[in-house]
Image (tube, rainbow, N blue to C red):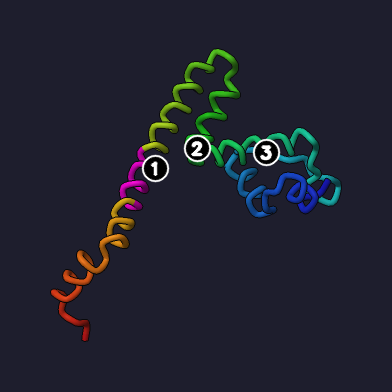
Amino acid sequence: MNISTASKETNVSADTIRYYERIGLIPPVRRNESGIRDFTDEDLRWIIFSRQMRSAGLSIEALIEYLALFRSGDKTIPARIDLLKEQEKELQERIDVMQSALDRLQYKIKNYNSHVVPNEKKLKEFR
């Protein structure tokens, strides 16, 4: 199947598929006599796997490292788990920062008249 069909099948844009191939998140896709990519079901599984790992919060760099470990075989399973745990930790830290920002914003909304307005009145106007 061509890249357009692969894109529809995986719900991943053609540009993203090309990018994934270029940086090694998916194996090189076989090309037909005309040089057009000819995707197999295996290629689609790689695209879906990469997208799922990205959706789970893995950075591109971490996913590249993960796949290098994967290609080295089952002996790397503990290292792969450690990598996923590190990604989990980093994601939790980002969530915590976002939660803190959300809490501050909600406080400002709830206390707008008593907190924000008096502070705004102390600001000099832009000219």
Q: Position of residue 116 (x, y in %)?
A: 23, 67
Q: Nearer the viewer, residue 10 or 42?
A: 10
Residue 116 horizontal side relative to residue 39, left or right: left
- Residue under circle 1? 95
Tag in front: 3 or 1? 1
Q: Position of residue 72 (x, y in %)?
A: 57, 20
Q: Main secondary structure of the magenta part?
A: helix
Say which label, 3 or 1, has the lower sequence index: 3
Height in image: 22 above or below 125? Answer: above
- Magenta-colored span: 93-102
Say which label, 2 or 1, has the lower sequence index: 2
Asked if one can make out residue 100 in the rendered structure from this viewpoint, the answer is: yes
> For the residue marked with disc 3, what is the amino acid?
Ile
Tell me the crowding category of disc 1: few under 14, some 14 to 19, or many 20 or more residues within 10 angstroms, Cα based: few
Q: Residue at x 55, y 13 (%)?
A: 75
| C-alpha separation, residue under disc 3 versus residue under disc 2 | 14 Å
Q: Position of residue 77 (x, y in %)?
A: 53, 17
Q: Which mark is residue 58?
A: 2
Residue 90 horizontal side relative to residue 51, left or right: left
> For the residue marked with disc 2, what is the amino acid?
Leu
- Residue under circle 3? 48
Q: Are marks 2 and 1 in contact (CB under 8 Å)?
A: no
| C-alpha separation, residue under disc 2 versus residue under disc 1 | 14 Å
Tell me the crowding category of disc 3: few under 14, some 14 to 19, or many 20 or more residues within 10 angstroms, Cα based: some
Q: Which mark is residue 23?
A: none
Image quadrant in which the C terminus is located: bottom left
Q: Total of numbered circles in the picture? A: 3
Q: Is residue 94 magenta?
A: yes
